[in-house]
Image (cartoon, rainbow, N blue to C red):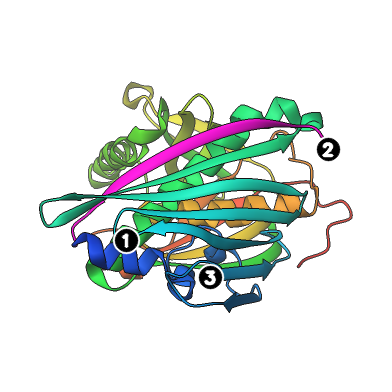
Amino acid sequence: MFSLPFSLSRSTKIDLPIQDVFKMVGDFATWKAWSPWLCQEPECPVQISGSPLERGHKQKWDGKRIGAGEMFLVDLKADQLLTYELNFTKPWKSKSDVSFEFIAEGASTILTWKMKGTVPIFLFFLRKMMASFVGADYERGLSMLKEFLETGKVLSETKFRGVVSRDGFHYYGIHRNCQLTQIGPAMEEDFTKLHKLIEAKKIPDPEFVCSIYHKFDMVGGRCEYTCGFAYQNPIETDSQDNIDHGRVEAHHAIQVDHKGSYKHLGNAWVTAYSCQRSDRKKILKGIHPYEIYLNEPGKVPDAELETQVFGVWSETKFMPL
């Protein structure tokens, strides 16, 4: 089958000696702790064979949501380079070259994860999007690997809840368009403003706190969202406070729960989207995906933060996995 190439590269700095990082990445037995794909489907069967850091060391998987394939070590240079061949059999057949490059920087390590892959020619229009999505996967994986190596754990746990029925609600909040890299600081600023309105008794305590994602452009690197407070019935607000208002109608959604740091919330979102892709489910127009926060940063440790993610798609012919 004819195919089109794409390539990508992502890097991070890990505050550990290069030997420790090289040993961790070169052992597939450790990947379950930080893999940006296995966290989406922890129950996915994975077979590991061969010895770590030896040619032929392999992992093979067969998932319902993350696809099926195998990855094996082709070549290595001690504390410098690991080269792999990655073969997918589902959702379509593909072959990619993957590598990890290691550079010492004092007592730390600069780790670079690279891929040279292809997409089927009939999906040529997805080439840029594919590079963006896989690049985001690499960023999530490197973030979790760094945290795992430096602290011994990753503050992220996802649970797929399946399809749920949701009541409608009114929301009041701050609407913003920003770069994806600025979402965290922007939302922190917005929620600080909103909480001040509650303290000033300009708006009542909410029934729940949420963020609604109106547009999420992975290729362009921008996001349009409203973060705010939700109520069953409308409330009165002062127009001088510049509060955006809207309503989400009753709907069905795919729910994924996340426990842990907000910086790993992408793990829950890709779990929801991988379910949508695997079932070829159409996005429901008019109702945007959203997340609900069950507790607050500062009041509980990051490890205890609980978030519910809701991907809104048409319920037609959907069978929960």
Q: Which of marks 2 and 3 is nearer the N terminus?
A: 2
Query: Which label is found at residue 1?
Result: 2
Residue 109 image point, x, y percent: 22, 53
Classify the position of the N terminus by image quarter: top right
Residue 293 image point, x, y percent: 43, 57
Q: Is residue 88 above or below residue 233?
A: below
Q: Main secondary structure of the magenta part?
A: strand
Q: Is residue 5 magenta?
A: yes
Q: Does the magenta stretch include residue 184?
A: no
Q: In this view, does 246 lie to the left or right of 300?
A: right
Question: Counting other residues with Cα less than 10 Å from the Cα at mark 1, is it few (<14), some (14-19), or many (20 or more)?
Answer: few
Q: Nearer the viewer, mark 1 or mark 2?
A: 1
Q: Which of marks 1 and 2 is nearer the N terminus?
A: 2
Question: Counting other residues with Cα less than 10 Å from the Cα at mark 2, is it few (<14), some (14-19), or many (20 or more)?
Answer: few
In the rendered structure, which amino acid carries the disc numbered 3? His
Residue 234 image point, x, y percent: 53, 40
Q: Mark 1 points at which residue?
A: 78
The residue lying toward the viewer, choosing from 125 and 300, is 125
Q: In this view, does 239 lie to the left or right of 122?
A: left
Residue 116 image point, x, y percent: 56, 39
**How far apart in space, not on screen, are marks 2 and 3 (Cα)?**
28 Å
Q: Give the secondary structure at mark 3.
A: loop
**How far apart in space, not on screen, are marks 1 and 2 (Cα)?**
36 Å
Q: Which of marks 3 and 1 is in front?
A: 1
Which residue is at a point 89% across and 55% down the rendered structure image?
A: 317
Q: Name the residue under label 3.
A: 57
Q: In this view, does 312 lie above or below 30?
A: above
